[in-house]
Amino acid sequence: MALFGLADGISRGIEGAGASLSEAFLDGSLRLGVTGLSRAGKTVFITALVANLLQRGRMPQLKAHAEGRIEAVYLQPQPDVTLPRFDYEGHMAALTGDVPRWPASTRAISELRLSFRIRPSGLFAGWRSPRTLHLDIVDYPGEWLLDLGLLDQSYDAWSEATLTRLAKRPEAADFVARARAEDGALRLDEDCIRALSDAFTAYLAAARDLGRVDVTPGRFLLPGDLAGSPVLTFAPMPKPAMTPRASLWREMERRFEAYKARVVSPFFRDHFAKIDRQIVLMDVLGAIHQGPRAVEDLRRTMAEVLGSFRPGRNTWLTGLFGGKRVERILFAATKADHLHHEQHPALTAITAALLAEAKSRADFSGARTEALSLASLRATVEETVTRDGEVLPAVKGILSATGKPAVMYPGALPSDPARLLAPARGGAEGWLDADYQLMTFAPARLTLKPGEGPPHIRLDRAIDFLIGDRL
């Protein structure tokens, strides 16, 4: 049986390699994973990206388009009929209606296929027919990505690290006190487990509402049909000196391991491990607004996220002997339209500095990683304001809360990222020499010309980095 299993695995690998070779020389396909951490605007990103690829009038930095090699782009039925389709039309209607609104955030995995018909280039271009590239956009919640970091952790290590991190967070005070007070050596009591799990879930919801980026386990807030099951009913707690059978701590450990095996591993195997390119959206401005601790949380979380990927180059042997590797990873700071363009280089530099440690490891393995600041859908126009006799670069938009126009100057980002990252890593309570402010803007009402997608900032550069080599 073992020999048969090995032979079957090799046979399937060869078939997969043959399919990869066929796609390389005939019609090709790429799977682009799109995820985002809290409040990063992932649904808006995918919607605006698809709209601007279908109507490319605002995509001058997409090289294949600038060179006239993209003959057509069109939506097609997705290949995986078991996944929900990303509701592009519904989200686009929300953004372009008479009263524009931001679409609902991602609650589960979904997929959409875009097909490109590309004119060949090079010496023998006139002798070759146009080729097709299928881009499968896989949308999944950022919390699911963070869960991949659990696979290499024991319940003991995860519990202690989580409780230590939460000790400094006011919204976690009730749960941490409850967890520290429990004796895990006592006999299993389902009411006690439920109370701890409920308190932990309440903390996760509060952390998400505050814009925390490290909200995991992710399925606690997006349970689906697992709601109320034991696999989503556990919490971190200190390890007692003795952990007898049927004890509270032992049962928590069992459920934690079941969560990894039954929830996290299938997502990695069925979806994440098949991704070729990946973009991770980050609300860097929101973290800066919250203060040094939020910036340090974001830096640490980004290092863990990049560690979850298997970066490197894909060859047909990769498919034969170990699945795909993520060849290109883009970390994008969203909401660049909340800043005047003069500050965009500083935002990009801060984003790159947040990733510097993890980026070097990915680059060493053969992957290409990049940091970028963008706005998927531009909701503001640029203005100037005068304050204490000084003219400052600002932006103007419609406030989400009131529907009234407002001008915002969020503060000047430092050109040297160390001025933010050093106090963040040092555990500072606040910024010493600056006060960064943010407003929440509603989408502007759009009037689009034929051939134009919605206005954006550097969406064309983002997609050119991610898939431009295959166009």
Image (cartoon, grey):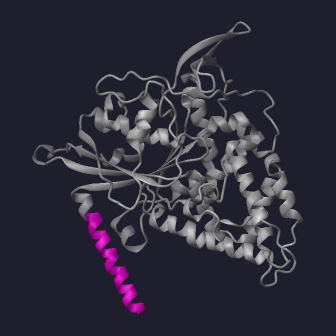
Residue lying at the far top in this picture: please name it: 389
Q: How many labels does the image show?
A: 0
327 in relation to 52, above or below: below
Q: In this view, does 114 lie to the left or right of 264?
A: left
Q: In this view, does 100 lie to the left or right of 349?
A: left
Position of the N terminus by quadrant: bottom left
Residue 454 on image: x %, y %: 40, 29
Residue 320 on image: x %, y %: 36, 72
- Taking depth in this image into account, of 187 and 78 the one nearest to the observer is 187
Residue at figure coordinates x 65%, y 29% from the top left: 415
83 in relation to 16, above or below: above
Q: What stretch is highlighted in magenta?
A: 1-21
- The secondary structure making up most of the magenta span is helix
Residue lying at the far left in this picture: please name it: 127
Residue at figure coordinates x 29%, y 32% from the top left: 66
Q: Is residue 147 left or right of residue 266?
A: right
Residue 378 on image: x %, y %: 49, 27
Q: In this view, does 346 lie to the left or right of 92?
A: right
Residue at figure coordinates x 34%, y 75% from the top left: 13
Residue at figure coordinates x 50%, y 62% from the top left: 310
52 in relation to 139, above or below: above
Membership of 4 in magenta stretch:
yes
Query: Can residue 132 be seen from the camera position used here?
Result: yes
Position of the C terminus by quadrant: top left
Residue 123 on image: x %, y %: 16, 44
Query: Can residue 371 be seen from the camera position used here?
Result: no
- Taking depth in this image into account, of 358 and 38 the one nearest to the observer is 38
Which quadrant of the figure has residue 195? Answer: bottom right
